[in-house]
Amino acid sequence: MGVPEGTKPEIQGEMMIPVSAHGLQCMSMSFLASDRTPAVWRGPMAAGALQQLLTQTEWRDIEYLVVDMPPGTGDIQLTLAQRVPIDGAIVVTTPQDIALLDARKGIEMFRRVEVPVLGIVENMSTHICSSCGHEEAIFGAHGGEKIAHEYGTKLLAQLPLSLSIREQIDAGKPTLVSEPDADVSQIFRNLAKQVVESVAVSGPSSGPRITVVND
């Protein structure tokens, strides 16, 4: 997001004021620890940190709160599902079969905790050569489409593996900021539009009911 190294959130009382970047409010564990400090935490510690970020951040006049989750179906994901009324989840995968296995587990977990899956985003869908512009599905094709069809949800977007995207993000200037008229920027806009429409249709969540079964 282009936030300068060493930036810390302002503290007002017991609340943290989110850091602003590109017109968005941001909060991250990286603001609370140095880049060289490893987060060597067991599950309850990580879950507690997530809860602190959610409940002790003074979010101001936001319409949507997007939580970027680590991969997996562990304590962090379950804590979020139990403690926060979630309107929906977006499952991000790559086209390979091994990645789709994890995506299936994520979808199954969200279904268990009654969180709607708004759709699938297929990252690294194709590789675009920075020299000639040739586009090739080097990681396989139709993986995201297949899993979306399997679970009766949408394939929201297919994002290319592009050198320019990596360079722009590493520089702290996301594609929508660096190249607002680029084809990839339109993909991001269409993705956001579909998510907004899906949330509007499903309505606000009252929170999940957690049921543990042995099957």
Image: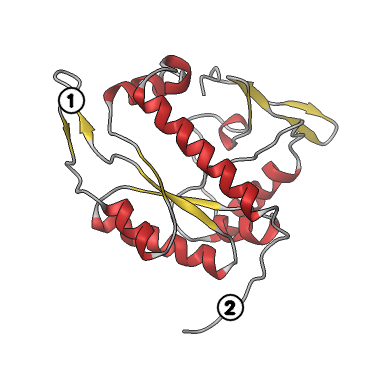
Q: Secondary structure at mark 2?
A: loop
> Separation of disc 2 and disc 1 at Cα?
47 Å
Say which mark, if any, is on residue 129.
1
Name which quarter of the figure residue 59 lies in. top right
Provide residue 133's location: percent of width, then percent of height.
18, 22
- Of residue 75 and residue 1, the one placed in the foreground of this image is 1
Provide residue 41's location: percent of width, then percent of height.
54, 51
Q: Is residue 6 visible?
A: yes
Say which mark, if any, is on residue 186.
none
Name which quarter of the figure residue 44 lies in. bottom right
Q: Residues within 10 Å of mark 1 (few under 14, many from 20)?
A: few
| Amino acid at the residue labelled 2 | Val
Provide residue 12's location: percent of width, then percent of height.
82, 28
Task: Tell me if label 2 and label 1 are in contact, CB under 8 Å.
Answer: no
| Amino acid at the residue labelled 1 | Cys
- Of residue 65 and residue 157, the one placed in the foreground of this image is 157
Q: Secondary structure at mark 1?
A: loop
Which residue, as the protein is rendered here, is positioned at the far right? Answer: 13
Q: Residues within 10 Å of mark 2 (few under 14, many from 20)?
A: few
Provide residue 84's location: percent of width, then percent of height.
69, 54
Identify which residue is drawn at 49% across, 29% down.
Answer: 35
Q: Is residue 132 left or right of residue 167?
A: left
**Count of all numbered marks drawn on residues in the image:** 2
Mark earlier in primary sequence (2, 1)? 1
Say which mark, if any, is on residue 212.
2
Whether residue 39 is situated above or below residue 167 in the rendered picture: below
Identify which residue is drawn at 40% across, 32% down.
Answer: 187
Q: Is residue 4 left or right of residue 178?
A: right
Identify which residue is drawn at 66% across, 62% down.
Answer: 82
